[in-house]
Amino acid sequence: MPSWMRSPELLALQHNLVFPESATASPVTLRRAYRCRRFSVDLSEMRSLRLFFANPACTCGQLVVASRESQYKILHFHHGGLDRLAAILHQWHQLLYPRLNIDTEETLPYRHY
Protein backbone atom coordinates (compact mmCIF):
# COMPACT_ATOMS: atom_id res chain seq x y z
CA MET A 1 0.00 0.00 0.00
CA PRO A 2 1.49 3.40 -0.92
CA SER A 3 2.45 5.60 2.02
CA TRP A 4 0.09 8.40 0.91
CA MET A 5 -2.86 6.03 1.42
CA ARG A 6 -1.90 5.22 4.99
CA SER A 7 -3.63 7.19 7.69
CA PRO A 8 -3.82 7.00 11.50
CA GLU A 9 -7.43 5.85 11.12
CA LEU A 10 -6.45 2.98 8.80
CA LEU A 11 -3.65 1.93 11.17
CA ALA A 12 -6.10 1.95 14.09
CA LEU A 13 -8.55 -0.14 12.08
CA GLN A 14 -5.90 -2.69 11.08
CA HIS A 15 -4.83 -3.15 14.72
CA ASN A 16 -8.34 -3.07 16.26
CA LEU A 17 -7.74 0.25 18.03
CA VAL A 18 -10.92 2.09 17.02
CA PHE A 19 -13.86 2.84 19.28
CA PRO A 20 -16.99 0.85 18.38
CA GLU A 21 -19.01 4.00 17.52
CA SER A 22 -16.12 5.55 15.59
CA ALA A 23 -16.65 7.12 12.18
CA THR A 24 -13.55 5.23 11.02
CA ALA A 25 -15.19 1.82 11.05
CA SER A 26 -14.27 1.26 7.40
CA PRO A 27 -10.93 2.06 5.76
CA VAL A 28 -10.75 5.12 3.56
CA THR A 29 -8.77 4.42 0.39
CA LEU A 30 -9.24 7.80 -1.28
CA ARG A 31 -7.66 10.98 -0.03
CA ARG A 32 -10.38 13.42 0.80
CA ALA A 33 -10.34 17.10 1.53
CA TYR A 34 -9.87 17.93 5.19
CA ARG A 35 -13.05 18.44 7.14
CA CYS A 36 -13.66 18.88 10.83
CA ARG A 37 -15.33 16.08 12.73
CA ARG A 38 -16.85 16.02 16.17
CA PHE A 39 -15.61 13.61 18.81
CA SER A 40 -17.28 13.15 22.20
CA VAL A 41 -16.48 10.82 25.06
CA ASP A 42 -17.62 10.32 28.66
CA LEU A 43 -14.42 10.96 30.63
CA SER A 44 -15.70 9.01 33.63
CA GLU A 45 -15.87 5.87 31.46
CA MET A 46 -12.32 6.14 30.12
CA ARG A 47 -9.37 4.20 31.52
CA SER A 48 -6.85 6.96 30.92
CA LEU A 49 -6.17 10.27 29.23
CA ARG A 50 -2.64 11.27 28.31
CA LEU A 51 -1.26 14.41 26.77
CA PHE A 52 2.03 14.13 24.88
CA PHE A 53 3.67 17.46 24.12
CA ALA A 54 5.66 18.03 20.94
CA ASN A 55 7.16 21.43 21.74
CA PRO A 56 8.62 23.15 24.84
CA ALA A 57 5.67 25.58 25.04
CA CYS A 58 3.30 22.58 25.45
CA THR A 59 0.92 23.93 22.79
CA CYS A 60 1.25 21.11 20.22
CA GLY A 61 1.15 17.34 20.56
CA GLN A 62 -1.34 14.52 21.00
CA LEU A 63 -4.22 13.67 23.30
CA VAL A 64 -4.55 9.90 23.72
CA VAL A 65 -7.85 8.58 25.12
CA ALA A 66 -7.96 4.93 26.22
CA SER A 67 -11.21 3.11 26.86
CA ARG A 68 -11.60 0.31 29.39
CA GLU A 69 -11.63 -2.13 26.46
CA SER A 70 -8.09 -0.98 25.47
CA GLN A 71 -9.29 0.93 22.45
CA TYR A 72 -7.54 4.21 21.73
CA LYS A 73 -8.39 7.51 20.09
CA ILE A 74 -5.51 9.85 19.25
CA LEU A 75 -6.26 13.52 18.65
CA HIS A 76 -3.46 15.56 17.08
CA PHE A 77 -2.91 19.23 17.87
CA HIS A 78 -0.61 20.54 15.14
CA HIS A 79 -1.46 24.24 15.39
CA GLY A 80 -1.69 24.83 19.12
CA GLY A 81 -4.46 24.64 21.69
CA LEU A 82 -3.15 21.65 23.63
CA ASP A 83 -2.03 23.93 26.47
CA ARG A 84 -5.62 25.13 26.96
CA LEU A 85 -6.92 21.58 27.00
CA ALA A 86 -4.19 20.62 29.48
CA ALA A 87 -5.28 23.43 31.82
CA ILE A 88 -8.91 22.27 31.68
CA LEU A 89 -7.98 18.63 32.29
CA HIS A 90 -5.71 19.67 35.17
CA GLN A 91 -8.60 21.57 36.81
CA TRP A 92 -10.90 18.58 36.28
CA HIS A 93 -8.30 16.25 37.83
CA GLN A 94 -7.85 18.59 40.82
CA LEU A 95 -11.63 18.56 41.41
CA LEU A 96 -11.69 14.75 41.38
CA TYR A 97 -8.55 14.30 43.50
CA PRO A 98 -8.10 17.47 45.61
CA ARG A 99 -5.56 15.93 48.00
CA LEU A 100 -3.08 14.86 45.36
CA ASN A 101 -0.59 17.64 44.70
CA ILE A 102 1.86 16.51 42.02
CA ASP A 103 4.17 19.30 40.87
CA THR A 104 6.52 17.01 38.94
CA GLU A 105 3.97 16.65 36.12
CA GLU A 106 4.79 20.15 34.92
CA THR A 107 8.32 19.10 33.92
CA LEU A 108 7.38 15.88 32.09
CA PRO A 109 6.87 15.73 28.29
CA TYR A 110 3.46 14.15 28.97
CA ARG A 111 0.63 14.28 31.51
CA HIS A 112 -1.59 11.43 32.63
CA TYR A 113 -5.16 11.90 33.92
Image (tube, rainbow, N blue to C red):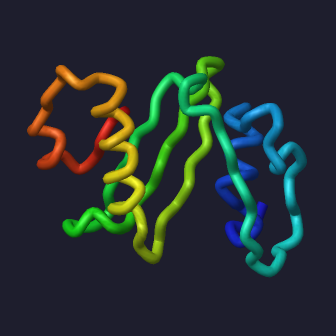
User: Compared to 61, does 65 lie above or below?
Assistant: above
Residue at point 10%, 38% (across, down):
104
Residue situated in front as seen by the camera: 17 or 68: 68
Quarter of the image containing the N terminus?
Answer: bottom right
- Residue 10, given in percent of the width and then of the height, sits at 75, 51
Determine which quarter of the picture holds residue 95: top left
> Horizontally, is 100 left or right of 35 in the view?
left
Quarter of the image containing the C terminus?
Answer: top left
Looking at the rendered structure, the number of numbered marks drawn on it comes to 0
Residue at point 33%, 35% (across, down):
112
> Horizontally, is 38 left or right of 55 in the view?
right
User: Compared to 81, does 9 lie above or below?
Assistant: above
> Horizontally, is 41 left or right of 97 in the view?
right
Residue at point 38%, 67% (across, down):
60
Residue situated in front as seen by the camera: 73 or 82: 82
- Residue 78, given in percent of the width and then of the height, sits at 47, 72
* The residue positioned farthest toward the bottom in the image shown: 33
Determine which quarter of the picture holds residue 18: top right
- Residue 15, given in percent of the width and then of the height, sits at 69, 35
- Residue 90, given in percent of the width and then of the height, sits at 31, 43
Residue at point 73%, 35% (across, down):
19
Determine which quarter of the picture holds residue 79: bottom left
